[in-house]
Amino acid sequence: MKKIDLSQFKVEQPVDLRKKPTSVDLDASKEKIEDKLKDVRKELGEWQDILYAYHKYSVLLCFQGMDTAGKDSLIREVFKDFNSRGVVVHSFKTPSDKELKHDYLWRHYLALPERGKFGVFNRTHYENVLVTRVHPEYILNENLPGINSISDIDAEFWKKRFEQIRNFEKHIAENGTIIFKFFLHLSKEEQRQRLLRRLDKPNKNWKFSPGDLKERKLWDKYQDCYEAAINKTSTEKAPWFVIPADDKPTARYLVAKILQEELQKYEEVKEPELAPKIRKNIDDYRTELESEK
């Protein structure tokens, strides 16, 4: 399989999504890519075990993308070899009445991973500068001071919201959360094909909603909002990665490989050593246990 420079997917300067590829050729069969993914996710699972024992960091993974981008299946495949207690997935839907009684970041704070664990946000706090920007009328449900009509939701409002999100991520990063943000970059044509498959395959019908077609008509507006969100919030401690998503096995492998390479940089994450008193008496403990035979 072709060696690929993963740094090309990291957003370190402003990006134009219309110029970013939605596919990448790894010069390998689907089977080969899936085999490579198995190797990488096994290593990630082992690293999570060590992270749990080290108990000073947590890892937050944020996944965003247009409908049908493959978020659900990617999460399932990449984290398949994790200890089930070591990774927690949250899928954020339309805010509930209770959630709307708090600020928009409240429910995301509650879902942050504990030290030693991976947390996965399937759709994230970025919905608050994506869906709500495409449909600003949703902001009115938040009952915010000074926001009485859509006309009150101006450029300054969005500027402040981006700043709030950057501050949220800065705060949790400084307190031990390692952050990764992945945008699954899908082409409009590939989305069309995937929506058609949902209609053509009886076992996929349940995934289809007429609302998908309504939102598809707003494709360009969503792309503009994604681009703005990525460019305004990709930072050293909370970087965005734009992942070509037209081919699902390739996207899964790229995400897993990026995680593997980036997490290896945390060289201090190691299994803790036994306390000297326990280590000194380890032979006595073994003898006591063996004598029970």
Image (spheres, helix red, strand yellow):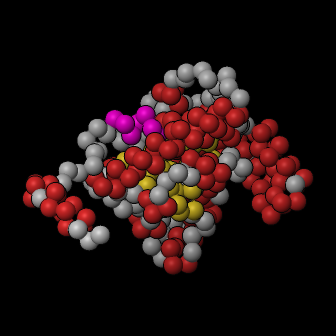
- The quarter in which the C terminus is drawn is bottom left
Q: Which residues are magenta?
A: 259-265
Based on the picture, tell me whether residue 123 belongs to the magenta stretch: no
Which residue of the protein is positioned furthest toward the bottom in this rendering? 98
**Which x, y percent locates residue 215?**
74, 53
In the picture, measured across the screen, residue 31 lies left or right of residue 138, that is right
Q: Is residue 6 above or below residue 280?
A: above
For image coordinates 80% across by 38% down, the residue present is: 189
Residue 288 seen in render: yes
**Which x, y percent locates residue 169?**
38, 51
Residue 157 seen in render: no
For image coordinates 42% across by 47% down, the residue present is: 46
**Which x, y percent locates residue 14?**
50, 31
Nearer the observer, 108 or 214 = 108
In the picture, measured across the screen, residue 212 lies left or right of residue 6, that is right
Magenta stretch prevailing secondary structure: helix
Q: What number of labels is visible?
A: 0
- The quarter in which the N terminus is drawn is top right
Nearer the observer, 183 or 6 = 6
Q: Quadrant of residue 252?
A: top right
Which residue of the protein is positioned furthest toward the right in this rendering? 200
Nearer the observer, 36 or 113 = 36
Nearer the observer, 144 or 247 = 247
Q: Quadrant of residue 261?
A: top left
**Which x, y percent locates residue 284?**
14, 61
Q: Is residue 134 above or below residue 247?
A: below
For image coordinates 56% across by 47% down, the residue present is: 78
